[in-house]
Image (cartoon, helix red, strand yellow):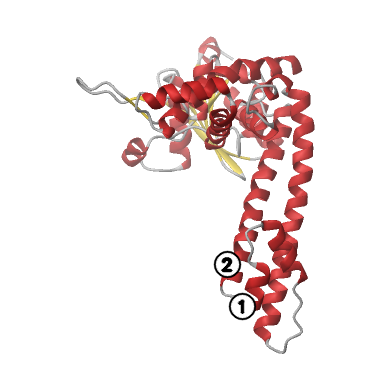
Amino acid sequence: MNRDHLNNQLTLGVDTHLTSHVAVLIDNIGKVVDTQEFPVCYIGYEKLFNWAKSFGNIRQAGLEGTGTYGAGLCKFLEEKGLKVFEVNRPNRAKRRLRGKSDPTDAENAARSVLANESTAIPKSHDGIVEALRYLVVARKSAVKARTQAINQIRALLVTAPEQVRVACYVPSTRLCIAACKQIQSNDSDVRLRTLAAMLNLLADRWLRLTEELRLIGKRLTELTKSTACHLLEQFGVGPYVAATLMVTAGDNPTRLHKESSFAALCGVNPLEASSGKTQRHRLNRGGSRDANNALWTVALIRMRSDPRTRVYAAKRTAEGKSIKEIQRCLKRYIARELYPIMVSDLSILT
């Protein structure tokens, strides 16, 4: 192997998919060296790495979907000592100009890393926070399905016969479910028999999902108490909120470098929108919406019950701020307050 080959500094870009990954190598002046497709498995990762090394020294890599389809390859490359960066999809303007294809996306990923446009370090996905993510994902889907179940019950009851509607359509969800469970119809009318059967089925579904949520909540409480004890001590922070914020930060939250990065990740940092003599900021609609909602929950609880926050809210209201504007300010302050506590909790584990 000659010296030029060894000194050839290459950047790897990968467009990740469920069954295959498309990889592109570019040199240090941005010239495409080669393009290849590999299967998604350990052998495929080995082939991809050996293929890349055969062209020279791999300086860095940019991957799309490091938290989804590219998680396995990301971990493999990091174990090989390669510096991996997370790459967002290209902006729409560039995509309209260059078109859309897997090799093009992989090339764009490599170029964004080479140009230092993509500098985000991927989450490690290898610690207890990943276990919390499993619970958060399961809880979110169970809550959604349970809400759908009770909404479907109430939708059926709205058009149900008078005697069924009076017996079951009550404000309390649990009383409504109990009444639906008790409905029995031996009537010859197929409509009434079917209605009774579906109300029983939906009530059973709601009860099963409620039990699922109880078990998930119990496990979530156990894990957060062992991993985020100091975070849970903060006013308004419960197990689900703590888990959501930790999942957003990842097992390696120090990759964020500072609390403003965490605020941006949660979508609570105001963005500059100034022009000419007009100096202003606008709402950030990006970031993790789950984390944003978790911070909103903390802000709402504090506005109701925390004396310090209530004084602040009263002061800002006197200045003419709306409730939503006050909540946005509070979410930014809360992110600044909770980030170092969360990092401290996770550093104890590692």
- Where does residue 102 sit, x and y in percent of width and height? 48, 41
Q: Is residue 140 visible?
A: yes
Residue extending furthest top? 3
Answer with left or right where residue 87 lies relative to residue 348.
Answer: left
Mark with earlier residue (2, 1):
2
Task: Identify whether 214 is placed above or below 337.
Answer: below
Query: In which quarter of the view is residue 17 placed?
Result: top right
The answer to which of 71 and 229 lies nearer the viewer is 229
- Badge 2, how many Cα within 10 Å: few under 14, some, many 20+? few
Point 62% across, 54% down: residue: 147
Q: Is residue 61 left or right of residue 221?
A: left
Task: Say few, some or many: other residues with alpha carbon within 10 Å of mark 1 (under 14 / 14 to 19 / 20 or more).
Answer: few
- Check disc 2 and give the amino acid type: Ala
Residue at the image position 49 percent from the left and 21 percent from the top: 311
Indicate the amino acid at tag 1: Glu
Discs 2/1, front = 1
Whether residue 253 is situated above or below residue 130 in the rendered picture? above
Image location of residue 16, percent across then percent down:
56, 38
**Vertical relation: 175 (above or below) 229:** below
State the quadrant of the C terminus: top right
Residue at the spot x=32%, y=37% of the render?
93
Q: Give the labeled residue for mark 1.
A: 162
* Relative horizontal placement of residue 4, taking residue 221 as reference (left or right): left
Position of residue 86 measured from the top left corner of the image (x, y, whole percent): 53, 27
Q: Nearer the viewer, residue 87 or 200?
A: 200
Q: Which residue is identified by label 2? A: 155
Q: Quadrant of the N terminus?
A: top right
